[in-house]
Amino acid sequence: MFKQIMGASVAALCFATAPSLAQTWDFTAGKSYVFGDSLSDTGNVFLAAGAGAPPVYFNGQFSNGPVWHEYLTGDTLALSPFLTGIIGDASNGINFAHGGARTYGFASSPGGPILPGSIEQAQFYAAGVANGSIAAPTSSDIFSIWIGGNNFLSALSGAPLDINQGVADIQQTLTTLASAGARRFVLFGVPPIGTSVEAPAPFDAQFDQAAAQFNLGLRSVDAAISAQFGADVLYINVEDLLLDLYADPAAYGFSEVRTDCVSQGLLLDACPADWSDYDGIHPTTQSHAVLAAFVVASGMNDDYAGQSAGGLSEHAYQVSRHLIVDAMDEAGRARQQTGPYLTGGWLDGSVDAEAGRAGVDYDGWSVSGGFNANLDNGFFAGGRVSFADTTSSVDSALAASGEAETFAIAVHGGWSTGAFYVLGGAGLGRTDMDTMRATGFAPRNSVTGSWVIDHSFTALEAGFDFTPAEGFILTPYLRGVFTDYELGTNIEQGVLLAGRYQETDFSSTLYEAGLRAEWQVSDAGQLTAGLAYESEDDAERTLGVLLNDVDLSTAQAGGNEDGVLRAQLGYVAEIRDRLSIALTAAGRTGDGTESLQARLQVRLGF
């Protein structure tokens, strides 16, 4: 099983390096700078002490093999002991992490040297940038901070545990780095200390509760640094990852998560590949590999979860728009076709990906029923009820799918002199959508959600019929449609990498100038065609997406479509009196928007 997990990890790592307009978290594009403690140290503590790594550990790491960032980047980082300067080639980055470090520096013995905390590590980096010994950061460089666990462990020996101060120290660490030019941070939460470390039993629950409080504080650090410096901060939810791993170790390829290898004399390669704990405090290299895969997946979700959600929103938007257009088309029929009616049909459509937005394919069926009535003096009116059941698939790096049920009601009315007409319509509807979105993390590869999207519209249309030849009618028209959409608060369901979509609403004002043509080619057949120019205002459709309640990304689900050309061609076959079948193909292009739609519809009048 572990080979499968490693395979998934490698696949995810390779995928994360693929170029994409929307991608932020490419972990191999620039240098990597690591700040923290023994969970990330690859030799600093032993070099600073002037001693080689003890035989229980691998190559200076506090594990039996490579640690998380070595799996992540595939590169060896230069070491930077606090006292002796940079050791090794810094072209791939520098590891400042120091075994035993807390968020603040302290002397491990009276009068001894200061063991650098994350504050001092960041200051050393900033000083190196200032004096030119370290290259100035680029927009591709990533700064990873994983610190805080030793603040908790030191409490076991009597050191005070000040959670608020520890969080403030980490904020100071990121502020120092950001002031030196860093703009892309990976910020790790602390593990559930009581559950993951061999601490005395009375401390288990207290440490887990304190760790959760500490991590909550880190979420505020994320938001503060992002706001102050315009930085990208990716929060890694180590707490939930490890709690899930302990609850279901088999999903991660582990059979043993409580007993550590060192206590059993299983050192280095003798440590079983399906054990997660190496020495009671530090993970095995296999656990580090899982963590690296989780970091990549977290980056993918930060990059693409909003894009996937935007595609699902586009699905709901297109279906509601389809029902609105149907309602207005039916309002036009009310001039000639009166009485009750039923319609049913199939819809198949797609919207191409563009400008950071995901493409989406959708299809399904719809039914509607209503009535049209001619009133006195050329007035007409009617109403309808519609229902559509559609599914969609979103073409994104994190694929998504939706199953939507849309219910809508509409009323219409107008006046016609015979050739000239004016009509209006209004309606409202609701879409209930069940969603599934990929996470890119093999052990927990999907999350689900349930959306509710409400819409309402008002519309006005005016046109004029003229007949250039027998059986051939041309109708130039103008139409305006105002639509309001509202997405209710939604929280995805999933153990890991589930997002939360902030409640949002937007309005769209669509102006359309078009020409419709109808040609009666036989007693039972009619060709239809249409060409229209559309301009949409105030329709920037965005979704606020929160991952781990901190990583706010804005997904553009749609945009102003100014200068869109829409064309359609169809055929209506009269099967018998008041029973017809219509086949229509339509497409829209312009302003970066490409979409296609095909419809088959049966209409029965009474």
Image: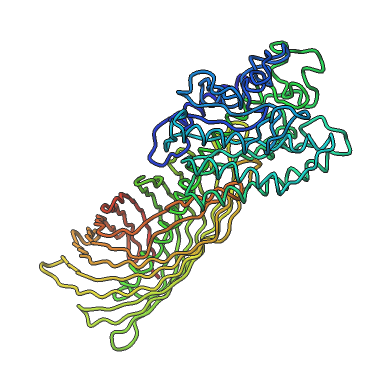
Q: State the residue at coordinates (61%, 25%).
A: 83
Q: State the residue at coordinates (45%, 51%).
A: 555
Q: State the residue at coordinates (66%, 15%).
A: 58
Extreme-left residue of the structure: 468
> Residue 384: x, y in percent?
44, 71
User: Could you tell whether 536 is left or right of 239 in the image?
Assistant: left
> Residue 450: x, y in percent?
58, 53
Give the quarter of the figure containing the C terminus: bottom left
Q: Nearer the viewer, residue 370 or 453?
A: 453
For residue 133, above or below residue 410: above
User: Could you tell whether 584 is left or right of 285 in the image?
Assistant: left
User: Could you tell whether 108 is left or right of 577 in the image?
Assistant: right
Q: Can residue 397 be seen in this view?
A: yes
Colour logic: rainbow
Extreme-bottom residue of the structure: 377
Q: Nearer the viewer, residue 374 or 3?
A: 3
Q: Is residue 1 visible?
A: no
> Residue 429: x, y in percent?
49, 66
Q: Nearer the viewer, residue 535 or 332?
A: 535
Extreme-right residue of the structure: 202
The answer to which quarter of the image holds residue 570 is bottom left
For residue 219, above or below residue 574: above
> Residue 528: x, y in percent?
23, 59
For residue 307, above or below residue 298: below
Q: Nearer the viewer, residue 533 or 418?
A: 533
Give the quarter of the figure containing the N terminus: top right
Counting the numbered discs, the total is 0
